[in-house]
Amino acid sequence: MAVERTLSIIKPDAVEQNNIGNVLAMIQGAGLKVLGTRMPHRSRAQAEGFYEVHRERPFFGELVEFMTRGPVVVTALEADDAVKRYRTLMGATNPAEADDGTIRQAYGTDIGENACHGSDSVENGKIEVGYFFPEYLLK
Ligand code: ADP
Ligand code: MG
């Protein structure tokens, strides 16, 4: 299996509820290696750029508002099959549908405020890690 990189974002809801350590413990407990982490409070323009693919969706304004209301914890992860493994650990987008043992089941509130983001493909994992951690782009 190939070593991949994927981007995790602990969203403002989970940061506000003091769940940074709990989420990172689940990530490390699942065997995903932390390459680097940062805690930026992002601007509206940055959040709009990151979620550009969702611009036409009805919840775009709400999503940008949410993702900019406080700091987030952005973490670059590396492991065999990291993209799929982290998506599985996060659980379904809607926490009400997320399996037991997932981050969203444990710490998500609703389909918007769902505690975490994870890259959705190997290609996007590379792009998103490079976006927040340019020092990892060429390695
Ligand atoms: P995922 O984060 O599971 O990949 P999507 O890429 O479909 O999910 O959506 C990106 C983010 O937009 C979600 O994590 C969630 O915060 C928000 N979102 C998705 N669907 C809705 C919705 N119906 N209403 C409000 N916010 C939503
Ligand atoms: Mg997505």
Image (spheres, rainbow, N blue to C red):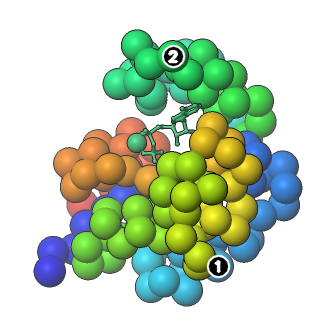
Query: Who is closer to the viewer here, 101 or 79?
Result: 101
* Residue at left offset 48%, top offset 57%: 92
Q: Residue furthest right?
A: 17
Question: In which quarter of the view is residue 113 placed?
Answer: top right
Classify mark 1: helix, strand or loop.
Answer: helix
Q: Position of residue 39 (x, y in %)?
A: 67, 48
Q: Residue furthest front?
A: 97
Vertical placement of residue 99 versus 93, above or below: below
Quadrant the C terminus occupies: bottom left
User: Would residue 43 be visible to someone looking at this image?
Assistant: no
Q: Is mark 1 within 8 Å of ligand 1?
A: no
Q: Is mark 2 within 8 Å of ligand 1?
A: yes
**Res 44 label:** none
Near mark 1 (Cα within 10 A), the count class, few <14, some 14-19 or many ≥20, is: few
Classify mark 2: helix, strand or loop.
Answer: loop
Vertical placement of residue 69 versus 110, above or below: above
Q: Nearer the viewer, mark 2 or mark 1?
A: 2
Near mark 2 (Cα within 10 A), the count class, few <14, some 14-19 or many ≥20, is: few
Question: Which quarter is ligand 2 in?
Answer: top left
Q: CA distance from mark 2 to mark 1?
A: 33 Å
User: Would residue 67 be visible to someone looking at this image?
Assistant: yes
**First-in-chain label (2 vs 1):** 1
Question: In which quarter of the view is residue 40 placed?
Answer: top right
* Residue at left offset 84%, top offset 61%: 18
Q: Quick check: marks 2 and 1 in contact, CB under 8 Å?
A: no
**Res 58 label:** 2
**Res 25 label:** 1
Query: Who is closer to the viewer here, 137 or 90?
Result: 90
Horizontal relation, residue 66 to residue 101: left or right: right
Quadrant the N terminus occupies: bottom left
- Amino acid carrying label 1: it is Ala
Q: Position of residue 48 (x, y in %)?
A: 50, 20
